[in-house]
Image (cartoon, grey):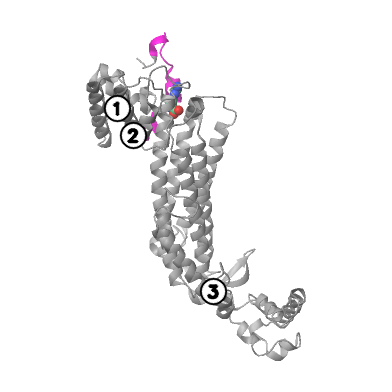
Amino acid sequence: MKLWGGRFQKSTAPEVEDFHSSLSFDRRLYRQDIQGSIAHARMLATVGLITQEEAGRIIRSLEEILADMEAGRVEFDPANEDIHMQIEKLLTERIGDAGKKLHTGRSRNDQVALDLRLYLREEIKALDALLAGLQETLLDLAEAHLETIMPGYTHLQRAQPVTLAHHLMAYFEMFLRDRGRLADCLKRLNFSPLGAGALAGTTLPLDREMTARELGFDGICPNSLDAVSDRDFAVEFLAAGSLIMVHLSRLAEEIVLWSTREFGFAELDDAYSTGSSMMPQKKNPDVAELVRGKTGRVFGHLLGLLTVLKGLPLSYNKDLQEDKEAVFDAVDTVKACLTVFTPMLKTLKFNKEAMYRAAAEDFSLATDLAEYLVQRGVPFREAHAVVGRLVRYCLDEGKSLADLSLEEMRSFSPLFDPGVLECLRPEASVARRRLPGGPAPETVRQAINHARKIMSAKNNYRGGGF
Ligand code: ARG
C-alpha cells in the first residue's frame, strides 16, 4: 500500500504511476535526502518527539541504506513514487515502528526543497572549482602570450591590434563574474526550509534552527508557504549556468573560427578534435561546436523553469517536480563542458605569425595615425578625415599603410614626420595602449598579477565568496 493510502479506496491507475513518479530522476538526491533525515531525526529526539534510542536506530539504519545505495545494492521501485518515499519505505522495512516516526512534522514538500538546496550547494562548489581551473589555464596562456600580437575585431572586421594575452584575459573576467554569480546564488540559497511542513508548519514543537545549524545553513526560510514553493534559487542557478554557457560558447566560437584555414590562428590538439567519416583530410572542432550547441539546453531549462513557476498559486504544487530534471541536466551539461574545455584550451597551439600578419596588414593602425595627428594639434574629427582619405588612396593604389612613403603621407598632412613610421608597427601601437584595462604588455602583466592575487586569496573574488 502507498504510504499515503489511508483515505483511498482504489489503487492508482498504472499510467498515473508512471506519469507522476519522479524516482527515475530524483533518486540522484538520495545522499541529500538521507543527510536531511538524519538531522531531522536528531532534532526529533532533542525536542522529545522520539526517544534517543529510536533516533539512534533510525540514524544507523539510514547510514546503512546510504551505504547500500552507494554500493548499488538497493533496488529502486518505481511504485515508490519518489526518492523520499523510497528511503522511508526501506527504513520502515528494516527497523519497523521507529522508522514510521521519522516523518513526524515533516512533508515531502519541505523535504524536497531541502534536498534540492543541499544538492545545489555541493554542485555550486564543484562548478566553482572547475571555473577556477579554467581561469588558471587562461592566466597561464596569457602569461605566455603577453607579446603575441593579434588583430582585435569589431563586427568581425579587423579593427585595432591587441595581444592574445589581452584577448584571453577578457574571458578571465567573464568567468570571474560567473563565479561571483554562483557565490551570490549560494548566499540566498543557504536557508533551511525544514519545519515548514506541507505548507503551514506543524503543531509539534520542532526546532527549525537546530536542523538548519546541523545542515550548515545560515538560517531558516522565514515563511513556511514560501519555504515549500520557492524555487528562485534554482532559477538563479540556471541563470548563472546560462551565462557560464554564453561565455564558453563565445570562446568556443572563436576557437572554431581561429582553427579555420581562413583565419589559421590556432590548431586544436588531435586529442581534442575529430575527423570525418568520408573526407580523409578533415580535422574538425567538434568539441568546441558541441559546447556551443549545448548552450541551448541550459537556456531552455532556465526558460522552462521560469514558465513552470509563472502563475503557480501558493504553495506547493506538483508542477514543482519539474524543477529537478532541468537543474540536473543543467548541472551535468555545464560540468561536462567545463571538464572538456579546459584541456582543449590548454593544448591549443597558436600560430603567432599568422596572428601578427593579420594585425600588420590591412588598416588596423589607421586609428593610431589619426591619434598621431591629434598629438600634433589636429582636432580628432579632422585627423579622422585625413586618415580616411589616406586609406582611400591606399585602396585605390592597392597598397597597405606600411607601403606608404613619408612623402606620400605628407601629401595628406605636412604634420606627418619620420616618427610616424614607428606608429605603423603593431607592437609599438599595442605598447602605447597603456591605460588601465588596455592591451600593452606591461598593463596586461599587471592585470595578470592582480588576477593571480585574486585567485590565491581564497573566498575573495570580486562579487562575493563562499
Ligand atoms: N516528488 C515530489 C517533487 O519532486 C516531492 C514532493 C511531493 N509532494 C507531494 N505532496 N506530492 O516535487
**For mark 1, what is the residue?**
42
Please name the residue shown 56% across and 73% down the image.
Answer: 434
Please name the residue shown 41% across and 32% down the image.
Answer: 114
- Picture quadrant where residue 67 is located: top left
The stretch drawn in magenta includes residue 14 = yes
Give left or right: position of 163 versus 80.
right
Image coordinates of residue 237 in percent, x first then y, are: 49, 42
Image coordinates of residue 28 in percent, x first then y, are: 36, 35
Amino acid identity at mark 2: Glu
Give left or right: position of 444 versus 43.
right
Part of the protein shown in magenta: 5-28
Q: Are marks 2 and 1 in contact (CB under 8 Å)?
A: yes
Q: Quadrant of the N terminus?
A: top left
Q: Which mark is residue 440?
A: 3
Query: Upstream in the sequence, badge 3 or badge 2?
Result: 2
The stretch drawn in magenta includes residue 72 = no
**For mark 2, what is the residue?**
214
Query: Upstream in the sequence, badge 2 or badge 1?
Result: 1
Give left or right: position of 167 versus 380.
left
332 to 80, vertically: above or below: below
Can residue 375 be seen in this snapshot? yes
The Cα–Cα distance between marks 3 and 2, rounded to whole angstroms, is: 51 Å
Give the image quadrant in which the ligand numbered 1 is located. top left
Label 2's element?
helix
Amino acid identity at mark 1: Arg
Q: Nearer the viewer, mark 3 or mark 2?
A: 2
